[in-house]
């Protein structure tokens, strides 16, 4: 092949890779994660308070997030995840959340609502995770495709992997090998990988597979099937050398506690906007705005 033609072909390939990376970055480079461990006896109150927060943010141009509950794993664990493009956007999202509550309820009642919320928790943790598009498999490369994927997702299987000090390069090499295998699978597997950059100790990676139903996990090839016996044996050896701990859980979305982007809602409105819950929460959120003098009464009603 002539050098000029070869150079042109390489340029086109490189341009395609860079374009895909730029498009994926537009989907958000970070995940802003809040994980709540709810007291079992406070779960109903926790859900009711969060429904009010959803309504307040939806009505007042507040923050956006997806909520999910751990179905297989620790009970009463609820996670809230917002996609961010930067740390500054995470800060802005928090401010928009607070402003939306204050506008809906008044500052005093909003503060009381947060106090009641905190009383529902046994513990919580927050994290910032960087999305590792270079380790993810078949990830969408534009907002429309991403919205379509999330809108159809109901369950998420996530492996939380703690990597030993000095083991990140070997672990990532292993993930890149798995990425190639997943992309060659029939059908190809979509797997998201992210890495904790704040809120965790050491190197922690999250490997998440999305599914429209629990049954969908049955048809997905195992890691051994993807890599073959020899590749799987190499993976097990490398994993033993590089990882110190791994937890695998299955979560399912909680649409009634989520405030997703409108692009996602539009693709599955019956799922992402449960009408009964949304109407009840909206009515509750609007009540304090009728008469600011009634905010104290609303705080008393929130006590359960």
Image (cartoon, rainbow, N blue to C red):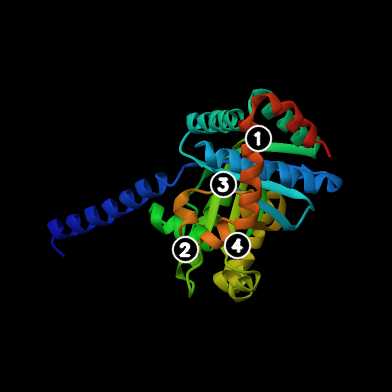
Per the image, label 3 sits on a secondary structure element best described as loop
Residue 92 x/y as whole percent: 51, 29
Residue 133 x/y as whole percent: 46, 50
Q: Which residue is mark 1?
A: 199
Per the image, label 2 sits on a secondary structure element best described as helix
Residue 198 lies, with reference to residue 183, above or below; the image says: above
**Horizontally, is 263 left or right of 16 in the view?**
right
For residue 51, which quarter of the picture? Answer: top right
Q: Which residue is mark 2?
A: 180
Residue 194 lies, with reference to residue 90, above or below; the image says: below
Q: Which residue is mark 4?
A: 154
If the image is split into quadrants, where does the C terminus sit? top right
* Label 4 to label 3: alpha-carbon separation: 15 Å
**Horizontally, is 287 left or right of 82 in the view?**
right
Residue 215 lies, with reference to residue 239, above or below; the image says: below
Number of on-image labels: 4
Marks 2, 4: nearer the viewer = 4
> Residue at position x 60%, y 43% from top?
55
């Amino acid at each position: 092949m002539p050098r000029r033609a070869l150079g042109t072909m390489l340029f086109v390939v490189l341009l395609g890779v860079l374009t895909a990376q730029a498009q994926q970055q537009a989907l958000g480079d970070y995940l802003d994660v809040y994980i709540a461990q709810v007291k079992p006896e406070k779960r109903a109150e926790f859900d009711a308070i969060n429904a009010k927060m959803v309504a307040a943010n939806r009505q007042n141009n507040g923050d956006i997030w997806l909520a999910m509950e751990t179905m297989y794993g620790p009970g009463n664990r609820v996670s809230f995840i917002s996609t961010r493009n930067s740390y500054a956007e995470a800060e802005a999202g928090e401010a928009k959340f607070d402003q939306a509550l204050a506008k809906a309820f008044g500052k005093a009642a909003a503060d009381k609502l947060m106090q009641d919320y905190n009383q529902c928790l046994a513990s919580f943790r927050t994290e910032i995770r960087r999305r590792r598009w270079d380790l993810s498999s078949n990830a969408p490369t534009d907002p429309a495709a991403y919205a379509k994927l999330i809108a159809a997702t109901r369950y998420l299987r996530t492996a939380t992997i703690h990597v030993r000090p000095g083991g990140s390069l070997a672990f990532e090499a292993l993930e890149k090998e798995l990425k190639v295998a997943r992309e060659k699978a029939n059908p190809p597997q979509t797997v998201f990988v992210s890495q904790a950059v704040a809120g965790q100790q050491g190197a922690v990676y999250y490997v998440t597979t999305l599914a429209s139903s629990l049954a969908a996990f049955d048809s997905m090839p195992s890691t051994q099937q993807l890599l073959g016996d020899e590749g799987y044996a190499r993976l097990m050896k490398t994993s033993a050398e590089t990882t110190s701990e791994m937890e695998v859980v299955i979560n399912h979305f909680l649409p009634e506690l989520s405030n997703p982007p409108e692009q996602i809602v539009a693709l599955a409105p019956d799922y992402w906007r449960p009408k009964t819950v949304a109407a009840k929460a909206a009515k509750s959120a609007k009540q304090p705005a009728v008469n600011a003098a009634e905010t104290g009464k609303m705080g008393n009603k929130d006590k359960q």
